[in-house]
Image (cartoon, helix red, strand yellow):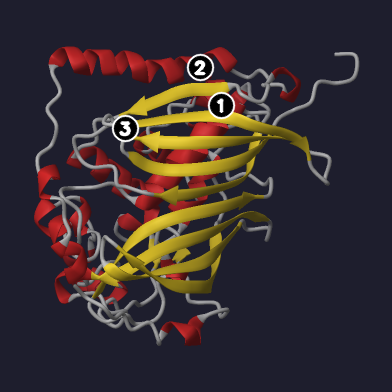
């Protein structure tokens, strides 16, 4: 078992902005459509122009989860600074604050990134493990702060993760035709909730502590669905960003998991080598042989996508007149290929904050079909208050 982890290089980066890549073109409506398609979020507000025209915005609007799609590193860059030799990285969680401005087609989104802090803890998964946090500040072309994301990365000796991989999880579960048909019915239950709410308000007055949110189900996850997610992050398509130069081996990534992912120089020479879905630190998501070398039993989902599922779950329930103002999610286990994802929630508090906003606090659980916890989260969601006499 590995007993040491050298994190001494991280300190010199804390509190100092790090480089960001920039978009080459403004956000397009089809970027938004690709995102909600990939995130399994069939909310008509974000892809159907006729429905969106009748909404409070009068046009297509991006979901609150979309800001991360306009970043070049899934929000993890400020949580992955400093060299840790022979290491790998997994996403550990995300905390989000949303400030009101929304993203539309035609917007230019930028991200200011500042490393925040880190701590080393002993874990069963990989021995000494660094939990590192960094902040992302997403703004539009008018300088308006859209959201702040505090991302947590888990950095550990890659070999140590490989030593503890669960061999009993190598094989995907098999789903019968009847089971898949029943699953489609479960999936549609949450989609039907979106249709039934429509453009109406979900009033703060009408919900109570103890109320359960409708179950949301999607999957089974496959290499195809994970690839669809990967392509929805704008940076993962050739030529979309003015890319910053990275040195993944300089961060301590092992050679087989480093490569030229999003390398601007190599993209002009041989872009095949720059695609992280095939080469580099992201290849473990789609290829079991590399997943197992870093501690995952088979292909697995993206942490940033898991965080977006959380935001979409809350926002879809709140409706177009509500807003997620804060959420804090901890990722406990991956979305493995062959598994399904089940989201549930319960209102645990109602309050009016110091700004006069009418909020509900919700506890959320994300699990697979075996009941294994994938993510836990809490969120504060603003809902409209009925007018006096209403």
Q: Residues within 10 Å of mark 3 (few under 14, many from 20)?
A: few
Image coordinates of residue 246 in percent, x first then y, are 34, 77
Image coordinates of residue 298 in percent, x first then y, are 15, 48
Q: Is residue 337 above or below residue 343?
A: below
Residue that carries the numbered disc 3 in the rendered image: 371
Q: Residues within 10 Å of mark 1 (few under 14, many from 20)?
A: some
Image quadrant containing the N terminus: bottom left
Say left or right for 247 vs 65. left
In what element is the residue under mark 1? Answer: helix
Q: Which of the two labelled residues, at mark 2 and mark 1, occupies the earlier sequence position? A: 2
**Viewer-proximal residue among 314 and 158:** 158
Residue that carries the numbered disc 1 in the rendered image: 317
Image coordinates of residue 15 in percent, x first then y, are 57, 78
Q: Is residue 50 above or below residue 271?
A: above
Tell me, yes or no, whether the two marked residues, 3 and 1, touch with CB atoms within 8 Å: no
Distance in Å between CA atoms under marks 3 and 2: 24 Å
In what element is the residue under mark 2? Answer: helix
Say left or right for 301 vs 30. left
Q: Which of the two labelled residues, at mark 3 and mark 1, occupies the earlier sequence position? A: 1
Q: Residue at coordinates 54% horizontally, 34% vertically from top-left?
A: 314
Residue that carries the numbered disc 2 in the rendered image: 193
Count up the numbered dots.
Answer: 3
Tell me, yes or no, whether the two marked residues, 2 and 1, touch with CB atoms within 8 Å: yes
Q: Nearer the viewer, mark 3 or mark 1?
A: 3
Distance in Å between CA atoms under marks 3 and 1: 23 Å
Can you tell which quarter of the image residue 245 is in? bottom left
């Amino acid at each position: 078992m590995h007993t040491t982890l050298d994190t001494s290089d991280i300190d010199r980066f804390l509190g100092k902005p790090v480089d960001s890549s920039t978009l080459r073109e403004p956000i397009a409506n089809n970027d938004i459509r690709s995102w909600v398609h990939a995130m399994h979020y069939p909310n008509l507000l974000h892809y159907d122009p006729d429905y969106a025209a009748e909404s409070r915005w009068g046009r297509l609007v991006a979901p609150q989860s979309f800001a991360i799609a306009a970043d070049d590193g899934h929000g993890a860059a400020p949580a992955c600074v400093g060299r840790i030799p022979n290491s790998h990285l997994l996403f550990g969680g995300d905390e989000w604050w949303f400030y009101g401005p929304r993203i539309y087609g035609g917007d230019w989104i930028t991200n200011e990134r500042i490393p925040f802090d880190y701590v080393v803890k002993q874990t069963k998964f990989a021995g000494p493990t660094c939990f590192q946090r960094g902040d992302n500040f997403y703004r539009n072309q008018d300088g308006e702060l859209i959201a702040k994301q505090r991302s947590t990365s888990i950095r550990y000796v890659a070999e140590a993760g490989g030593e503890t991989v669960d061999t009993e999880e190598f094989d995907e579960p098999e789903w019968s035709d009847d089971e898949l048909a029943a699953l489609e019915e479960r999936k549609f239950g949450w989609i039907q909730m979106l249709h039934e709410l429509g453009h109406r308000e979900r009033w703060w007055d009408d919900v109570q502590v103890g109320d359960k949110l409708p179950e949301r189900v999607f999957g089974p996850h496959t290499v195809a669905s994970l690839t669809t997610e990967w392509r929805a992050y704008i940076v993962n398509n050739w030529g979309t960003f003015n890319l910053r130069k990275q040195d993944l081996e300089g961060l301590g990534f092992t050679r087989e998991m480093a490569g030229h992912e999003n390398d601007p120089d190599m993209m002009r020479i041989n872009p095949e080598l720059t695609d992280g879905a095939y080469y580099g630190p992201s290849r473990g998501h789609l290829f079991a042989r590399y997943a197992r070398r870093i501690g995952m039993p088979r292909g697995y989902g993206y942490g940033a996508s898991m965080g977006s599922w959380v935001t979409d779950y809350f926002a879809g329930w709140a409706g177009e007149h509500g807003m997620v103002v804060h959420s804090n999610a901890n990722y406990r286990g991956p979305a493995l290929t062959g598994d399904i994802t089940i989201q549930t929630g319960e209102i645990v508090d109602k309050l009016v904050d110091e700004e006069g906003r009418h909020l509900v606090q919700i506890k959320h659980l994300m699990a697979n079909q075996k009941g294994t916890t994938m993510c836990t989260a809490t969120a504060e969601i603003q809902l409209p208050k009925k007018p006096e006499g209403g």
